Amino acid sequence: MTTKSAAARPDFERIALLLQGGGALGSYQAGVYQALAEANLHPDCVAGISIGAINSAIIAGNPAAKRVDKLRKFWETVSTPPLGIPDIASLKLSNDFQHTMVNQWRALGILMWGAPSFFQPRFPPPIFTPAAVPDRLGFYDTRPLKSLLESLVDFDRINAGETRFSVGAVNIKTGNLIYFEDQTHKIIPEHIMASGALPPGFPAIEIDGDYYWDGGIVTNTPLQWVLDSRPRQDTLAFQVDLWSARGELPRDMIEVDVRQKDIRYSSRTRKGTDEFRRMQSMRRAAAKLLDGMHPELRQTPEAELLAQEADSKVYNIIHLIYHAQRYEGSSKDYEFSRRTMEEHWASGYSDMTRTLQHPEVLQRPQNADGVFTFDLNTQGRH
């Protein structure tokens, strides 16, 4: 891939990168990040859920010059064929049926043996064992991931706060989503692992006496976290999703399973941004009213309450969504083959490169509500 010359930083107070969960599909996000890095769009704020949390930690936990290499190291490690099985990434496939068979064979291998340095089968399976603590209740053991994270991520760098960092997980007892942030927690590997602890495959992760599951159980996209964060700032947000809410009608039972996964784990970005747009319109209107308000009226409790919500900040929300090929099937989120990893990475790189060819993406919005949204697949067809 060709490295492009760096451009000047856009006129925003912060650049945010928001990474959705989606297992093996996460190499798409790594390709997106490579294109951003080549365009000199290094994020000031990174947030993720599940596999997005892992990618986020690698990005925030390394200097800009090393991030792409560290992402590449992670994805090449977890996509290494297990047990000495030869890599078939170079095998030429002439049609979707052959591609499907190869993908399903590789996915079966992952189910049986796990992904190197990521997760491994638990023997005996917990379904055949007596009652146990939550961190033993999973078909796979994710302890290998801790060592891999420690080798790729500088947690001292994350906790130093150079890049604002957050990952989402669900408290099992309360059922509430919590964001582990560098500003409120000392981030350790367990916070990243908790964000990706999707049951029943992966066990819960214990942190300070509480047990956590994958944040995607409640919400799979951390967009709301950055929109709600204080203090508010002019924001250029790149939201990278791995599941598409829009799709075709299923034609068989495999496609039924694929479609329900897409719907379950996709973000409701359009609904969320529409609501945010309305709220931001009111905040900007309140700011104008307060500016013209008589000083005595400004000192009333009602005006002071209004002032807490009023602002004139602007937001660009750039939405990228991975659109899977039909041959990927319902195993697309756990098919960690090298061939598929490279395909996803190249797709993310291409989509982000094409997105940045639209100049409005990096320009401050001039509309009344101060919110601009862009989706390559709906607004950038060419």
Image (cartoon, rainbow, N blue to C red):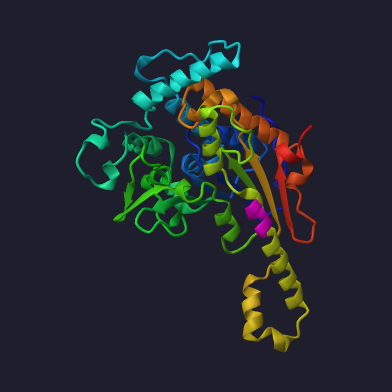
In the rendered image, residue 267, in percent from the top left (x then y), is placed at 58, 46
In the rendered image, residue 281, in percent from the top left (x then y), is placed at 72, 64
**What secondary structure characterizes most of the magenta part?**
helix
Range of residues picked out in magenta? 271-276
Left or right of 332, for residue 116:
left
User: Nearest the camera: 172 or 195?
Assistant: 172
Q: Quadrant of the C terminus?
A: top right
Q: Quadrant of residue 275?
A: bottom right
Left or right of 28, for residue 70:
left
Q: Quadrant of the N terminus?
A: top right
Q: Residue at x 73, y 86 (%)?
A: 295
User: Nearest the camera: 54 or 340?
Assistant: 340
Name the residue at the left extreme.
130
Left or right of 111, for residue 287:
right
Q: Residue at x 75, y 76 (%)?
A: 289
Determine if the magenta segment contains residue 275. Answer: yes
Location of residue 335 with respect to 178 vertically, above or below:
above
In the rendered image, residue 269, in percent from the top left (x then y), is placed at 63, 49
The answer to whether residue 313 is seen in the rendering is: no
